[in-house]
Image (cartoon, coloured by chain):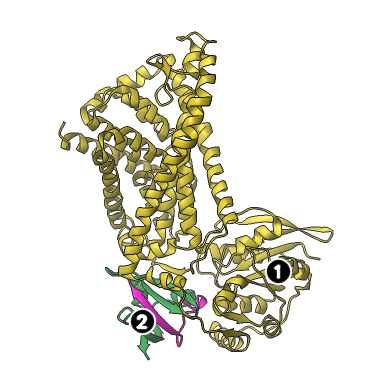
Amino acid sequence: MVSLEPNRKGRVVEILGGASLNNKLMSMGLYIGKEITKLSHIGLRGPVVIKVGRSILALGHGMASKIMVEIE
Amino acid sequence: MIKKIYLIGNPNVGKSVVFSRLTGVQVMSSNYPGTTVEISKGYLRLGEERVEVVDLPGTYSLEPSSSAEKVAVSLLNEYPRNEMVVINILDATNLERNLLLTLQLVEAGYPVIVSLNMCDDAGHRGINIDTTKLEKLIGVPVISTCAVTGLGIKLLIERIKEGSPTVKKSLTNEDRWKEIGAIIQQVQSLEHRHHTLREVLEDASVRPLTGLIMAAGIIYASFKIVRFIGETIIARITDPIFSNLYQPVLEKLTLCWQESGFWFHLLIGDLIDGKIDFKQSLGVLTTAPYIEFGMVLPYIVAFYFILSLLEDIGYLPRLAILLDNVLHRLGLHGYAIIPVLLGFGCNVPGILSTRILESKRERFIASTIISIGVPCVPLQAMIFGLLGQFGGFYVGGVYLVLFSLIIILGLVLNRIMKGYSPELLIEIPPYRLPPLATLAKKLYFRIKGFIVEAVPVVIAGVLVINILLYFKLFDFITAIFAPFLKGLFGLPKESIVALVIGFFRKDVAVGMLMPLGLSAKQLFISATLLAISFPCIATFIVLWKELGLKDLIKSTLIMITISVIVGTALNFLIPH
């Protein structure tokens, strides 16, 4: 997700990291198979901003780097 | 028989507004997730009964992942299900994400009523939801509401008694999302709308370049507007009241007392050039009310107006993501900007709101940083009052010292404290134009909170100082600390009184320092010391409550160490 370019769409294929992260993201609507649009990435290891469904989420850099996305 | 009603929903869906509509109890709501840190309770008249309504903290799921969510879920299980109703509040502009919690609630067998809130906003965004169909698909009553205007609330109350437990088999979250997908297909239709200006701005504020430009502009404009509103209130309202109405009354009163008597000293203070000087006389009836109402309150009003406006528009989470990279290195994450900003008004609400941060470590770092490096409005009014005459250079210098301290302290604490701070994960709310009434209510709450907390302490503080001064009790303390002050900070012995008073209220200290005739350098050092040493007594009590005794002592030791180092360094580094 970190290396995805802004304004590109992708599909979540894997979320590395423990069950608690998975659950947290799952309850906010971000789960494996979900389509996302990356909006931006704030520099200097800043957060990644994505659009999931109708919500906009900001994820810390470390968290975003655990989410693998497949470009469509 | 319904004995209890719970309000539950995702963060930032207008739950608190529905709560105040139902109960008439006024609570604050903000356009960012996590406003409801405390649980509010109120009562709703349902026919003959008075039913308790509990507003639970926002939660995305019944499988809690944060402490606020855990509280919500545990409260929900306190009462037998046949005696309660759960009102699940949904944001109609984001139905899909909100439905996960709804399905979980229905499956768990709670008697659920759905309030599909923000229906007007959904309309503006071209989202149409078929509520009858939704009701059929999820099997519980669904009522369209718009809590801000009160639309649909009556119907919601009427249908509360329809809530009854249903039996449904439990699914996994993966299957729930599939089911939600299918529900959305059937009930929601989107009209294509062109991008509105609002959406363009929403988008621009989360991109690095445009976001930073917008942030710089907004912060600069906010600062200017706060000063403008504050100065206007002082010039047009408070100063005329003090000098044209209040001063003549006081002058009549002074005729009743002898000038050097105890009561005169206590209530009026010293006459400066034969006249009452509101800034320097230091009496309970002169300087005490003037500091609070004539110097500080106008800026408090201005500050909270701008902050509440930015908050309700939904700008603050966007600022949080822009600053996340910096704050992450200080052991915090972007969301910590909210307590920090509140701290600029008054440290007390700032430290209270560190509750929105997850770990104890973050709360310690944030609270310590706020107490040391974030100057509250009274303190800032004091800094400007003392140093403004010497030009922006000195005023800016204090801010520069404070800012550097925040950075250094954060970097150090992040390195030496055990554990690590969690990462940012927040939802960015859409921009919403807050109704004027809600904004006014919020401003009223905050100003009232400030007055209730500050005014008694200021009056008591001035009273105590005057008694101590009259009986010359300060001479003792002065004698002990004089060599220390002189040697390390280059300050005269009288300034110890001001520094001690700063522990009660920062703004009272200004009245103490002014008559001393200090040089620019000495005023600069004393203002900086007042800012970074102990916070005022109210903040201290809140720190104790929030951190516990052990961490309070740690935090205090940090403050003392930093004050000594910085005070000494400034004294030896700045040329005369």
Residue B488 lies, in percent from the top left, at 22, 31
**Residue ID for mark 1:** B152
Query: Disc 2 on helix, strand or loop?
Result: loop
Q: Is residue A13 above or below residue B436?
A: below
Q: Is residue B364 in sight in this rendering?
A: no
Q: Residue at x 48, y 24 (%)?
A: B286
Q: Colour of chain B?
A: yellow
Query: Disc 1 on helix, strand or loop?
Result: loop
Residue B165 lies, in percent from the top left, at 74, 76
**Residue ID for mark 2:** A7
- Chain of the residue on which disc 1 is drawn: B
Among all residues in the image, which is located at the extreme right?
B48
Which quarter of the picture shows residue B78? bottom right
Q: Are marks 2 and 1 in contact (CB under 8 Å)?
A: no
Range of magenta residues: A25-42
Q: Which mark is residue B292?
A: none
Q: Is residue B133 left or right of residue B535?
A: right
Q: Is residue B227 above or below residue B537?
A: below
